[in-house]
Image (cartoon, coloured by chain):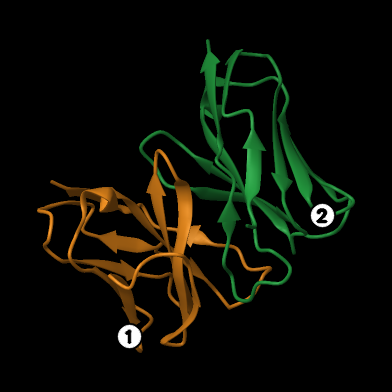
């Protein structure tokens, strides 16, 4: 079956702009989590959604927001971009919500803010 | 705060040598998961250990979960060039809800042929 699909793969934006990243989880998976990966901070949890509701949120400002659609597709929006937002953004889908579920990662969207 | 630490940060080995990376959590984990990320790629799930003291093997890879569920290790026997990549441990803390994972900083493995 198809894996986690993230679009676009690469983005270049200017400081102050906003950006929307998209993620389609594996069919049947209802939990979607997002992580930010940077060389300095490693993999940092952004948030997790299940059944269109945010269930967990990491230590990121409100400029980072998300929306899960009824078909589980997910969009993450980042407003008022800062240079420090340059990172690889990874979407992970899981079959269910809980501790013992395997996370399947997409290939990521590499965002560069200039 | 709650964190997961991983050492070493880098490891260079000759092909055929063994490799071990260690993971330590500041608090008890519900389980420990290991991921491998190839250069330019994304994390790929390797394994999950749930029980205290659990040991699992996948061919040349051996994974251990500590008795206190606060530490773990990944050991690769006789490394091959295909083992190149960054290995991450990650876990949900027992008291957190959902599927939130806290990742270690990763160990970047390079293998010289």
In percent of width and height, residue A99 lies at: 67, 70
Chain drawn in orange: A
Visible residue check, residue B58: no
In percent of width and height, residue A62 lies at: 32, 73
User: Mark 1 = which residue?
Assistant: A69
Asked whether, in this view, residue B44 is left or right of residue B67, the answer is: left
In percent of width and height, residue A14 lies at: 9, 53
Closer to the eye: label 2 or 1? 2
User: What residue is shown at x 46% (from left), y 65% (from top)?
Assistant: A59
User: What residue is shown at x 84% (from left), y 59% (from top)?
Assistant: B51
Visible residue check, residue A16: yes
Q: Which chain does the numbered disc 1 sit on?
A: A
- Front in this rendered view, residue A55 or A29: A55
User: Mark 2 = which residue?
Assistant: B69
| C-alpha span from label 2 to label 1 | 36 Å
- Front in this rendered view, residue A37 or A93: A37
Chain drawn in green: B
The residue carrying pointer 2 sits among few (fewer than 14), some (14 to 19) or many (20 or more) residues within 10 Å by Cα, namely: many
Q: Which chain does the numbered disc 2 sit on?
A: B
Asked whether, in this view, residue A38 is left or right of residue A103, the answer is: left
Q: Residue furthest front?
A: B1
- The local secondary structure at tag 2 comes to loop
How many marks the image carries: the answer is: 2
Quadrant position of residue B12: top right
In percent of width and height, residue A96 lies at: 58, 78
The residue carrying pointer 1 sits among few (fewer than 14), some (14 to 19) or many (20 or more) residues within 10 Å by Cα, namely: few
């Amino acid at each position: 079956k198809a894996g986690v699909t993230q679009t676009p793969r690469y983005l270049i934006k200017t400081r102050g702009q906003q950006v929307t990243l998209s993620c389609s989880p594996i069919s049947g998976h209802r939990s979607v989590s997002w992580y930010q990966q940077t060389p300095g901070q490693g993999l940092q949890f952004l948030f997790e959604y299940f059944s269109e509701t945010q269930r967990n949120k990491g230590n990121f400002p409100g400029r980072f927001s998300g929306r899960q659609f009824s078909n589980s597709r997910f969009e993450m929006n980042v407003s008022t971009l800062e240079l420090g937002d340059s990172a690889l953004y990874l979407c992970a889908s899981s079959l269910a919500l809980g501790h013992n579920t395997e996370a399947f990662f997409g290939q990521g969207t590499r965002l560069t803010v200039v | 705060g709650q964190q997961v630490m991983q050492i070493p940060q880098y490891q260079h080995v000759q092909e055929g040598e063994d490799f071990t990376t260690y993971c330590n959590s500041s608090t008890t984990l519900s389980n420990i998961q290991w991921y491998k990320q190839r250069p330019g790629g994304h994390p790929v799930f390797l394994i999950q250990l749930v029980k205290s003291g659990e040991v699992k093997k996948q061919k040349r890879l051996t994974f251990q979960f500590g008795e206190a569920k606060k530490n773990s290790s990944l050991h690769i026997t006789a490394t091959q060039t295909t083992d190149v990549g960054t290995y991450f441990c990650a876990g949900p803390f027992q008291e957190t809800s959902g599927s939130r994972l806290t990742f270690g900083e990763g160990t970047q493995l390079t293998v010289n042929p």
